[in-house]
Image (cartoon, rainbow, N blue to C red):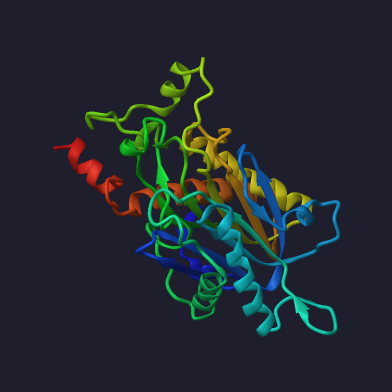
Amino acid sequence: MEKASLDSLPEFLIGQAQDQHAMTGCTAIIAPQGAVCGIDIRGGSPGTRDTAALNPLCNRKTVHAVLLSGGSSFGLDAAGGLMQLLEEKRIGRDVGVTVVPNICSAILFDLKCGIAKIRPDSLMGRRAGENAFSRCPFQSGNYGAGTGATIGKTNGLENAMKGGIGMSVFLHGDIKVGAIFAVNCVGDIVENGKIIAGARKADQTGFADSEKMILNSYATEKDFFSGNTVIGCLITNARLSKAETSRLAGRGQDAIAKTVHPAHSIYDGDTVFALCSGQTETSIDAVGILAEYAASAAIVDAVKSARSYKHYLAFREIEKMDHS
């Protein structure tokens, strides 16, 4: 198993668009030839578009794009612009009078980071798609769906940190798996068993430990700023059935459980898609191992690549403070 770049999965196009003033954006993952798509939702507050047909019992065979977006439920509008662009490029189901692109979307809540009245819209969704076709380099941190992402809200927004979007690709033999994850969670980010980002103590001397805070407030149903969420998409050249692809998305959720503490809270909308282009025969377990490594690495990349915004300090600044 070794690390690779997004270029090793040319059957997928990734594009991002953002408003750095309003601190929001979206990320498009496009499969021009179509890809088998699965989904796994484990957060208690999800926001999605056109995902019911991903059920293996439904007829939909392929999906042409997944859009990850900020803006809370308003951000679901961005998929319309991407859909219009794909229709113009004749990417979608041919229904005679036109083509209908199959586009799924998931959103995260970033309205309290920048300007709440500005959200990803159809123009931004289209721009993300155009950047994908232009093969603009992927940027981790405060870009795309991770532009306004924040993490660690259990001790109040004043002690939260900056999240972002991250990417990682792993391969073994002919199997290749990539992960693109936007990290905007209630809880903390853990690497090698240690909290590296999340809720800070009020005196900024270290981490408050979100799990302990939730346990200590068990007698009250405290809303830790509704609408957080980790959303992501796995991309692979593996050939899997529709049901297996949903199981693959579940391995992305396993990665969230390993790296986000707590994961899948009632205030998160943790949603993972998986797209399989089908070039390589493999077992679900083999590709699942790569998927879990890729998703974990993408989550950590999102946090380590983030830049501070206003009082939301980023990992790189906190690391300097804690080692000074």
Residue farthest along the front direction in this orientation: 117
At a point 86% along the width and 51% down the height, the residue shown is 57
The quadrant holding residue 201 is top left
* Left or right, residue 157 beside residue 99: left
Residue 173 seen by the camera: no
Measuring from the top left, give residue 47's x and y in whole percent.
62, 49
Foreground residue among 177 and 139: 139
Q: Determine whether 261 is above or below 275 in the image.
A: above
Which of the two residues, 122 or 127, is positioned nearer the viewer here?
A: 122
Q: Position of residue 261 (x, y in %)?
A: 47, 32
Give residue 315's position: percent from left, percent from top. Answer: 30, 45
Q: Residue at x 50, y 26 (%)?
A: 222
Q: Is residue 35 above or below residue 217?
A: below
Q: Can residue 114 be seen here?
A: yes
Horizontal side of residue 309 vs 324, given as left or right? right
Q: Identify whether 253 is placed above or below 98.
A: above
Position of the C terminus, as image quadrant, is top left
Residue located 67% across and 46% down the image: 40
